[in-house]
Amino acid sequence: MKRLASLLGRLGLLRPELDYPVIRVTLLINFLFFGGWQWAIALLLLLGFWNKTLGAAGAVAGAVTFIYTVTSIPFRPDAWAASSGGFPAMGGATPFLIKDVVLFAACLYLLKQDLLRTPYRTAAGTGLLRSNFEYHLLRGDGAHISHVRPRQMV
Amino acid sequence: MVLIFLMFGHGKWFEYAARLMVNYTTHGPLIFWMYPLLGLRGESDFLGASELLTASLFFAGFWNRKLGMVAALLSTFTFISTVTILPFLPSERAFLLKDLVLLAVSLYLLRQDANRVNAA
């Protein structure tokens, strides 16, 4: 395992500066593709490369969008595939919409990263800026376990 | 990611998702061979099993970084396989476009866990 981890490092896959721009760009591409008013979110995310306050606003707007899409799932008549025994087998648009759980978490990751780069770092009191918050969120996506002890960042 | 792999892994054990999935996988440059080799349900069961394994390892990753690293690696392969379908897919691209973000998140988790394993 250690050899695998060091191999990944030598392949250049573990460079810390990559996550932030890559997650931003992939979210941006999705908002561009959704079209309509969500182009405004794409624009805010784009401006976030230079202006972290606008970036944070885009991340909040994105997160709100995904709360809306994910919470709409159980109210859709074809949300669960009856032929597969219903819940949790996904039907209709659910496979498409359920991925927004990760996109929501990715928006919170961006929000935290942007806030850390603005004078609004006092938002730490909300728990959003607690160390490892986004790490556990991105892993669990709803299976977030609050009793996991925060570990030292490396 | 735990939730995503659980949900998608569960669905693949049924005919409904297996039929939907083939429309995508046959266009995938990395996974087109699965349908002719394993058949409709064979392909779906294989991917379902690997996704439930990935979900379990991701969950174990809360406590064990090495297992988390393996999960992130499997997840990275999964989403490289789906994202590479994109240029060859005639329609419904939005569904796979979201996998770009899922790939980015997989790489984030891979980095987090592998760096912790390296530091341990």
Image: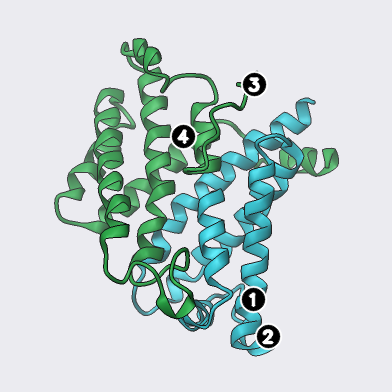
**How far is disc 2 from disc 1 in space, using C-alphas?**
9 Å
Q: Amino acid at mark 3?
A: Arg
Q: Which numbered mark, 2 or 1, is in the foreground of this view?
A: 1
* Residue that badge 2 annotates: B38
> Residue drawn at (26%, 60%), measured in percent from left and top?
A75
**Chain B takes which shade in the image?**
cyan
Report whether mark 2 lies on the same chain as mark 1.
Answer: yes
Disc 1: CA contacts within 10 A as few (<14), some (14-19) or many (>=20): many
The residue that label 4 is drawn on is: A20
Nearer to the camera, A54 or A139:
A139
Q: At label 1, which amino acid type do we have?
A: Asp
The residue carrying pointer 3 sits among few (fewer than 14), some (14 to 19) or many (20 or more) residues within 10 Å by Cα, namely few
- Find disc 1 in the rendering and name its residue: B45
- Residue A11 visible within the image: no
Separation of disc 3 and disc 4 at Cα? 21 Å
**For discs 1 and 4, the disc positioned in front in the rendered view:** 1
Which chain is indicated by disc 4? A
Q: Could you tell me residue B106's position as x and y percent?
A: 57, 47
Query: Which disc number belongs to residue A151?
Result: 3
Q: Is residue A51 left or right of residue B22?
A: left
**Residue B114 location (% of width, % of height):** 71, 37
Residues behind callouts 1 and 4 on a single chain: no
Q: Colour of chain A?
A: green
Disc 2 from disc 3: Cα separation: 43 Å
- Amino acid bearing label 2: Leu
N-terminal of the pair, mark 3 or mark 4, is 4
The furthest residue to the front: A85
Q: Rounded to the nearest whole Å, what is the CA distance between mark 1 and mark 4?
A: 35 Å
Relative to the observer, which residue lies in front, A104 or A1? A104
The answer to whether the residues at label 2 and label 1 have Cβ atoms under 8 Å apart is: yes
Q: Does dot 2 land on a helix, a strand or a loop?
A: helix
